[in-house]
Image (cartoon, helix red, strand yellow):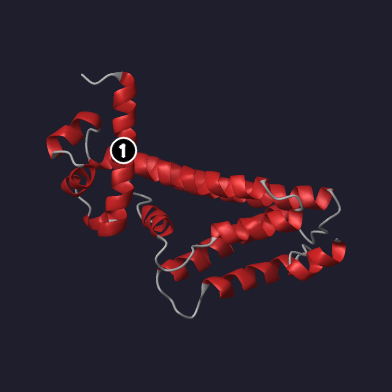
Amino acid sequence: MARPNTQKQRRSELIEATLQAGSAHGLRSLSLTDVAKRAGLTRGALLYYFDDLDSLLVEAHRAGTERYCDLRDEAVAAQSSYAAKLRTAIDAGLPSGPDDTLMRLLYEFDFMTGTSALHDELVQKMYLRQFATYRAILGDGHAAGEFTVRGDIDQAAMNLVALEDAYGLHIVGGNSLITVDAARTAMLGFCEQIGCGVTEDAAAERD
């Protein structure tokens, strides 16, 4: 039996191998053999650490969600102004392009909603993380007087999450009519419309 620390490390490696194999093969056609090959293990050895492919996919889904949300929140926290925080949240929330493997994989995980209560829970948790990021920036920025949010702040945060997800899905889906720059510009425009000046020009004027 593997020692606890060794077992934890091996499980982490298998989760990473699942994310990589899922990006390469797609979740719908992914098999335990694909993951085992990526990890350099036999299929039987993989089953020592996870009961089946579904349990491995749940952990990969959890890891991918946490990685996406944690990295964004760290980038947002590093900014000093609320306008910069909001721009950073939008930039980090959109895919880098059609070949953004992690984002494409997270959208694939979204399509697994309804197949497992755990996947449903993880999709909801990601939404709540997205919502909390935007809600905190809008609310704190409004309280600090940097923003003057028009309308309900919770609804504004919901709309930003919806825009982020909708544009992101088009981008990773290869819709050439919606580029990363176009999506970013549209989301920044929405922010301006609700009373959150986030353009670089507006930030420079305040400075």
In the foreground, 3 or 192: 3
What is the total number of numbered labels drawn onto the structure image?
1
x 42%, y 46%: residue: 64
Percent x, y of residue 60: 35, 43
Q: Is residue 155 visible?
A: no
Percent x, y of residue 131: 61, 50
Q: How many residues crowd mark 1 within 10 Å: few (<14), some (14–19), many (20+)?
A: some
In the foreground, 35 or 162: 35
Judge left or right: residue 158 versus residue 113.
right
Q: Is residue 75 visible?
A: yes
In the foreground, 159 or 93: 93
Res 1 quadrant in image: top left
x 57%, y 73%: residue: 181
- Residue 179 versus residue 35 in the image, above or below: below
From the image, which quarter does the C terminus lie in? Answer: bottom right
Percent x, y of residue 193: 75, 69
x 76%, y 65%: residue: 194
Res 152 quadrant in image: bottom right
Q: Which residue is mark 1?
A: 13
In the foreground, 51 or 201: 201
Percent x, y of residue 189: 69, 71
The amino acid marked with disc number 1 is Glu
- Residue 126 versus residue 146 in the image, above or below: above
